[in-house]
Image (tube, grey):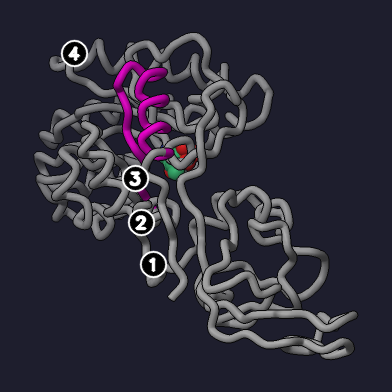
Amino acid sequence: MAEIRLNKKNYEHNLRVISKKASGRVILVLKSNAYGHGAKLLAKTASELGFKFCAVKNEQEAYELTQYMQEILILSHIFNGSEKDDFIYAVNSLDDLKTAKSGTKIHLKIDTLMHRNGIDLSEIDTALKIIKERNLQLLGAFTHFRSADEMNADYFVQKQNFMLVKARIKEQTDSKDELVFHSHASAAFERNLSGFDDEYVRVGMAQLGYAQFDKNLELKPVLSLWARRISARTLKATQGVGYGAKFIAQKDMAVATYDIGYGGGLLRYGGQGELLLANKKPMLGKMSMDSFSCEDVGEWVCVFDDARSWAKFFNTIEYEILVKLSPFIDRKWV
Ligand SMILES: *Cc1c(COP(=O)(O)O)cnc(C)c1O
């Protein structure tokens, strides 16, 4: 069966590098099965290194990690009045505050420019009032940068907006020393050279080894995807392999078929252009649901060990290549 091998040394290295730059204040984003890596595996290893705060999408993901993490922030909860004491919930609108169960632990999401989720700057005072009235536990606040990966001024505008909100919240709150503020996801985290003002960072992709800006951080990809040989044969000159015979052998060659395809979460290669495997050899012919063919290189072939090459080929971002990997693929540390 195809397997995902997670490089423990690289993960530990990335965590150390991030923790150093963020002065130990780190929230690990482990949503969507840790971007396809395997949330439980990563949470266990991270917790052994002392990382105890993570963020996920919903309660279902949070329950998977309770045994490893002390604090779990749920980013996209749909409030229903039965929020659990074990988790911290991101508040994405004033309505959330009205629906939340009394006593719920919350972080306020602040809309500083992205206009996706969060409390508008003009709603802060109302929000604080409802929090008091409804006896919710305000533990922190955060925002998200809309274009941290583009070199423009948005980052600075949002930083300024968030600073004002932080001051306002501190003014209005008794437990201001314990409040946890956070804004920098991976791209912003890398970009930042001026420190984080005691904020936490909230990083997903950086922990997995994909630097976008700061090559000096030397982050190293953690995941490699391996496929196992199902069968091998000699493809004779003029014979084609796979659906539609999109690859035709020019001379006799040893080919093999390996056990993952788009059913395992790979984007589907339809035979156009050259899609290279980690060994720089091309996939041959169209990808099938559960397999693909390539030159026979033995029992295992590494599909990719750096998702950027596939992201480039498919004109997408490495996030999408990784997150689609099926949860049914075996995963292990190596
Ligand atoms: C996914 C997500 C992150 C992590 O983003 P990366 O670019 O992977 O670091 C941080 N914050 C929020 C709100 C997110 O949804």
Instruction: Classify mark 4: residues with Cα within 10 Å, few (<14), some (14-19) or many (20+).
Output: few
Please say whether residue 299 is one of the residues in the magenta stretch: no
- Assign a secondary structure to mark 2: loop
Q: CA distance from mark 3 to mark 1?
A: 21 Å
Above/below status of 39 relative to 288: above
Left or right: 14 with respect to 71? right
Residue at point 25%, 60% (across, down): 60
Position of residue 205 relative to residue 6, above or below, is above
Distance (Cα) linking label 2 and label 3: 18 Å
Q: Are marks 1 and 2 in contact (CB under 8 Å)?
A: yes
Circle 4/circle 3 CB separation < 8 Å? no
Of tags 2 and 4, the one toward the viewer is 2
Q: Position of residue 290 (x, y in %)?
A: 55, 81
Residue 152 falls left or right of residue 4: right
As drawn, the label of residue 75 is: 3
The range drawn in magenta is: 10-31
Q: Which residue is mark 1?
A: 327
Residue, disc 4 = 177
- Spatial CA span between label 4 and label 1: 40 Å
Q: Are there few (<14), some (14-19), or many (20+) residues within 10 Å of tag 3?
A: many
